[in-house]
Image (tube, helix red, strand yellow):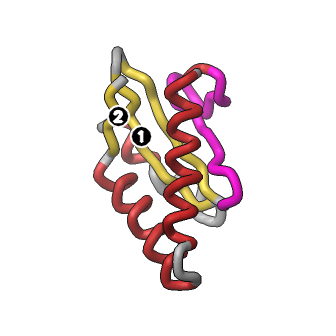
Amino acid sequence: MRIIYHPEAEAELVEAAQFYDQRVVGLGSRFLAEFDSAVSDILQSPEQWPRVEGDLHRHRVRRFPFSVYYRVVADELRILVVRHHSRHPDYWRHRLGE
């Protein structure tokens, strides 16, 4: 399955890793490793994770206050949001139509 990141989701991922690395050297790498683990979980069983609405699912990243919001379309895993849990729950809604 091919993985496609929404440009804003990719930016959120990079920003989070940079933030953690600025706080503690190496923490950004640990965040990315946990994120990659979440994506691997999704790839193994995409329908297992809770539906947010319609065909949109959410998977929480272990050890960090982030969730991955995604869709599976044909043979593509589309990652739409990398959301910190303290952000407004609807800030990303405009991405659903893209």
Helix, strand or loop for disc 1 = strand
Report the amino acid beneath label 1: Ile
Q: Quadrant of the C terminus?
A: top left
Please state the total of marks drawn on the protein image.
Answer: 2
The residue at the far right in this view is 63
Identify the residue under disc 1: 79
**Sequence-first disc among 1 and 2:** 2
Give above or below for 22 relative to 88. below
Taking the image as shown, residue 47 lies to the left or right of residue 29, namely right
Which quarter of the figure is the N terminus placed in? top left
Q: Residue at x 65, y 22 (%)?
A: 48
Q: Which residue is mark 2?
A: 3
Q: Could you tell me how far apart the alpha carbons at marks 1 and 2 are, in whole angstroms?
A: 7 Å
Residue 6 located left or right of residue 83? left
Q: Position of residue 20 (x, y in %)?
A: 54, 75
Coordinates of residue 16 in the picture (x, y in percent) = 48, 68
